[in-house]
Amino acid sequence: MRRVIDLIFQTQFCRTDILKKSVTNMGAKLYNKLPNYIKNVENLKPFKNQLKTFLLQQTFYSVDKYLAYNQGKTSSLYYPNPWDEECDRLIIIIIMIIMMMMMMMMVMMIIIIIIIILDIKPHQPTVRGRAIFRM
């Protein structure tokens, strides 16, 4: 049986956002948050497959949500909320569009009902009392 190695990269203190988001700093943070079963894979292809499976199962919507993830906890504090701000805005826009379409359909139905109840005929253009027929 292979020995489990818990490899953790050290991150340095950074005062600026440029250094915080640098490849060396973010790469170390992202790697350290991986589960041990992925970090212990020895070959590149199985590592990529395990990583892809993990990321597809968890559905992180941002890097911040991934960094807030904690494997052992089941609290909603640690699991990413799939309805973050971007999703909320999109869903609100879609709901508003659907509601506007429904309101337009209701207005059209009310107009049709009024026309049926009042038995309104289409307007015929007239000149001095005589109907004009156009073809």
Image (spheres, grey):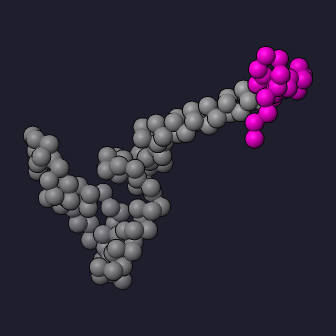
Is residue 112 within the magenta segment? yes
Q: Which residues are magenta?
A: 111-135
Q: Quadrant of the N terminus?
A: bottom left
For the point 76% across and 25% down, which residue is it?
Answer: 125
- Give the side of residue 7 with respect to residue 73, left or right: left
| Residue 77 appears in the rendering | no
Q: Nearer the viewer, residue 44 or 97?
A: 97
Q: Is residue 45 left or right of residue 124?
A: left
Q: Nearer the viewer, residue 6 or 75?
A: 75
Residue shown at the point (42%, 37%) measured from the top left: 85
Residue 54 in the image, given as x and y percentages of width and height: 42, 64
Residue 108, located in which quarter of the rendered image?
top right
Task: Say whether residue 77 is left or right of residue 31.
Answer: right
State whether residue 104 is above or below residue 20.
above
Numbered marks: total? 0
In depth, the one of 74 and 86 nearer the eye is 86
Q: Is residue 114 magenta?
A: yes
Please provide percent x and percent y for residue 100: 61, 31
Q: Quadrant of residue 29?
A: bottom left
Residue 75 lies, in percent from the top left, at 47, 43
Occupied quadrant, residue 107: top right
Residue 34 position within the rendered picture, expressed as x and y whole percent measured from the top left: 32, 61
Q: Is residue 66 at least partly visible in the picture?
A: yes
Residue at image point 15% right, 47% down: 20
Quadrant containing the C terminus is top right
On screen, residue 61 versus residue 106, left or right, reads left
Residue, x 10% and y 41% (percent of image)?
16
Q: Please name whichever residue, 94 or 130, is drawn nearer the observer in this view of the structure.
A: 130
